[in-house]
Image (cartoon, rainbow, N blue to C red):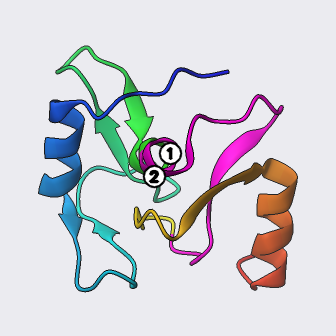
Amino acid sequence: MDNVIGFDEDAIRLIIKHTVVTNLYSCYDWRGSKTSEGYPTIQLGGRYGPKITAHSLVCEWFNGPKPCIPSCVAMHRCNNSSCINPRHVIWGTQSENVKQSYRDGRR
């Protein structure tokens, strides 16, 4: 099981700096760096720190540690890969994520 990254001041600062929030229920749009697939990334601890996806970090903060299930991922309920709204991100398996993407017309 992955370790939960606590409410580290640097991580919180990065999340706030790179997020646009228009209201509590809509997507929180990430304006920082992203993976080639459009997922938000942050680098913790400076230049040589670990690079992680911001939505996974938010999922850990609000939903607890990543479950010890093979292929567990942070899924977007909203289908917006750059969203980091804690209400929109949940833990699920890669299989569930793929099924959701077909059901919602993303594949």
What residue is drawn where x is 83% and y is 31%? 70
Identify the disc placed on residue 87: none
- In which quadrant is the C terminus drawn? bottom right
51 relative to 93, above or below: above
Mark 2 residue element? helix
Left or right position of 58 against 45: right
Identify the disc placed on residue 55: 2
Q: Nearer the viewer, residue 37 or 85?
A: 85
What residue is drawn where x is 21% and y is 20%? 45
Q: Are marks 2 and 1 in contact (CB under 8 Å)?
A: yes
Q: Nearer the viewer, residue 49 or 64?
A: 64
Mark 1 residue element? helix
Image coordinates for residue 13, horizontal then vertical, percent: 13, 44
Q: Is residue 94 magenta?
A: no
Left or right position of 80 against 8: right
Q: Quadrant of residue 31?
A: bottom left
Image coordinates for residue 11, horizontal then vertical, percent: 24, 37
Tag 1: amino acid: Ser
Task: Give the extent of the magenta segment.
Answer: 58-80
Q: Is residue 65 magenta?
A: yes
Left or right position of 1 against 61: right
3D distance between C-alphas at marks 2 and 1:
4 Å
Image coordinates for residue 80, horizontal then vertical, percent: 51, 74
Callout 2 environment at 10 Å: few (<14), some (14 to 19), or many (20+)?
A: many
Image coordinates for residue 102, horizontal then vertical, percent: 83, 76
Tag 2: amino acid: His
68 relative to 53, above or below: above
Q: Quadrant of residue 22?
A: bottom left
- Quickly name the residue at label 1: 56
- In which quadrant is the N terminus drawn? top right
What residue is drawn where x is 51% and y is 49%? 59
